Amino acid sequence: MDARTGLPVVGMVGAGQLARMTHQAAIALGQSLRVLADSPDDGTALVASDVVLGDYRSLDDLRAFAQGCDVVTFDHEHVPHEHLRALVADGANVQPGPSALRFAQDKLAMRERLSALGVPCPRWTAVASAADLRDFGADVGWPVVLKAATGGYDGKGVWVVESVDAAADVLASGTRLLAEEKVAIERELAAVIARSAFGQGAAWPVVETVQRDGICVQVIAPAPDLDDELAEHAQDLALRIAAELGVTGVLAVELFQTRGGLVVNELAMRPHNSAHWTIEGTRTSQFEQHVRAVLDYPLGSPRPTAPVTVMANLLGGPADVRPAGIDERVHHFMAHWPDVKLHLYGKQFRPGRKVGHVTALGDDVEEVRARAAAAADYLVNGDKE
Amino acid sequence: MDARTGLPVVGMVGAGQLARMTHQAAIALGQSLRVLADSPDDGTALVASDVVLGDYRSLDDLRAFAQGCDVVTFDHEHVPHEHLRALVADGANVQPGPSALRFAQDKLAMRERLSALGVPCPRWTAVASAADLRDFGADVGWPVVLKAATGGYDGKGVWVVESVDAAADVLASGTRLLAEEKVAIERELAAVIARSAFGQGAAWPVVETVQRDGICVQVIAPAPDLDDELAEHAQDLALRIAAELGVTGVLAVELFQTRGGLVVNELAMRPHNSAHWTIEGTRTSQFEQHVRAVLDYPLGSPRPTAPVTVMANLLGGPADVRPAGIDERVHHFMAHWPDVKLHLYGKQFRPGRKVGHVTALGDDVEEVRARAAAAADYLVNGDKE
């Protein structure tokens, strides 16, 4: 407990934009997020007071960090699983716990578990050899999606391969692999919910996530023209996965909508890009909700505040921006879009890097999408004359 | 400029709840507010990375603080006026500037200037002697409101006196004083606006402020049943005062509604308690808007997000709360009011102290008021059995 405030101390491993926005939300709850940062230049280290520098791969650093935290949580899933177990053995309150987090860290374990629960997934198999891949491809048809079981994100660690030969390098790399059927996707959705340690659940409206090159560029809330029954099914599925896996905090279930219904793509057990829109778009943001859930506070209302909310990521454009150029763009952005909300993550604008996002709200989905996209495009690319 | 982000550095003198909430808003703009704090336990010092400890009454401390700030602004009006002038002479970019701030620091100067501008004020006079007060009381009738020209806040520095004799102690104290007619108040309103250095203005809806013992306990937005013409008049008045006085940042104009119309009570040139509701209740909070205005960024939209928003202050109850008691109350508050937003300032709960506020939104003013009041009452007083 923080003796100055009478409130428990939340520690988050990782100090990127997710921790940064969690800190921002935590301030209102009387909190000051403690973060384990790689560098004093991490997005959260720039704005928070309680910053511990250390390596999330070092058990010593994790142990030192956990001292004095009433709960330890995460802004990424890359902490080695054995370290999570060691922290729990030390008596630390780790939320979500290792046995849940495992299914966000290891795609093979996730597929096994979800399949056992009867949750719809693409057809999949573990791939230990070229023969495994050949058999699977013969069965489901080429191309096949090959995935590293651990360590991937934002399209990294995922390869769409047309043949066993095309996968030779990956197969030879020694990476633990699984193969998945390349399903015919109508669109991608995300069902994001939160679950507290006590077991309370709360679901935000199901959203459509628009991807480009494996990276989410836009999130539309709620998912346009989504059948009510299907939306409810997706929320129920996410709440059920959270309960079965013992997830605490935010759980994002990335879904493929196919002609045959919904199948689960990925799980993330932390605040997630597909729910940044909840900051302005719902009564309780995913960041506040994550803090509430891991502290085992009762959850806040996930009710929307507007008919349509669209979030667009700011992905650094092709050219580096000279530093003063960012401030100039912020000026023009604000003049042009006085009602679009800006979120910058404290990063230099570099090609392809997620440097922030914008959120637009309104009544008409096409208008709101166009407004968010134009604002984001201007911020990352500047004038195109 | 902060080389890590390419954005200008905003420094705020003072590190209480106003700076705390400004920091929270500034994070989204890619900023990290630099604050001049009295103590490492100040509300903002608990949550911000860029904290300078020092005394706002010391010119040396102010000068050291201003180094490297692209703009210096304030969370209170107590910085000695001559120090503000000295900072400007040094070349610092002080927003609002000393010649505007003077009218928020000195009630006598404010009354002189507003009267010269033809802005409606209660009848008033400077009081240098008992005779001045006697003559004024004879003229406007007793009781009379006696005010310290400088240094007052939240009812401090204000005395309602029935006679010259009753004012003897204050008169003898050597304080610079003014006397004001005790106007027959129907209710209190506030017109809060922002003005950028460039001269752009933006007005939030006019609110009703409900006071108890000279301290604001509740703010209702918009002011219920306020005539449209009167509301527009109040906004115009505030925008005009800002322009005439050269205010930058947020300007709160506290108003008395009387049978004869509106009269100005006080001015504040900083984020103000009467606009905390804008965090959830409008598209651009007063804290974000203050940062935009002092940086001379274009202003954000002040449009409401709900038909009714009510803010209730958390004023520490009669008994000290044992530290663990606060966390317990937060639990119960969250369980009971999942859609009421909490803002804690990182302070111990002590009698009469502003320790936070809550904000409720909805459609029906009586329902929203009752909800906000019940939630606030529970948080500061606990169960009353």
Image (tube, coloured by chain):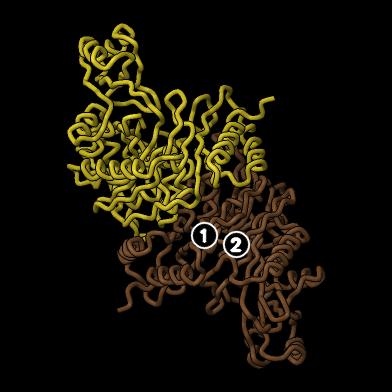
Chain colours: A brown, B yellow
Residue A94 vs A344, above or below: the answer is: above
In the rendering, which numbered label is found on residue A76? Answer: 2
Nearest the eye: B12 or B129: B129
Q: Could you say where residue B147 lies in the image, as x and y percent from the top left?
A: 30, 21
**Amino acid residing under circle 1:** Gly
Q: In this view, does B241 lie above or below B110?
A: below
On the image, which quarter does residue B165 sit in?
Answer: top left
Report the chain holding disc 1.
Answer: A
CB atoms of marks 1 and 2 within 8 Å: yes
Distance (Cα) linking label 1 and label 2:
9 Å
Q: In which quarter of the image is the N terminus of chain B?
A: bottom left
- Label 1 packing within 10 angstroms: few (<14), some (14-19), many (20+): many
Residue B28, labelled with which disc? Answer: none
* Chain of the residue under the numbered disc 2 shown in the image: A
Residue situated furthest top in the rendering = B165
In this rendering, position of residue A27 left or right of residue B196: right
Q: Tell me which residue sits at (46%, 55%) in the image.
A: A40
Q: Which residue is drawn at 21% across and 13% down?
A: B132
> Identity of the amino acid at label 2?
His
- Position of A268 with respect to B134 (left or right) is right
Residue A348 position in % (x across, y down): 40, 65
Q: Name the residue under label 1.
A: A16
Residue B74 position within the rendered picture, expressed as x and y whole percent measured from the top left: 33, 40
Pointer 1 and pointer 2 on the same chain: yes
Residue B200 appears in the rendering: yes
In the image, A280 versus B62, the foreground residue is A280
Q: In this view, does B200 lie above or below B215?
A: below
Residue B78 appears in the picture as rendered: no
Q: Which of B297 and B180 is in front in this view?
A: B180
Tag 2 or tag 1, which sits nearer the N-term? 1
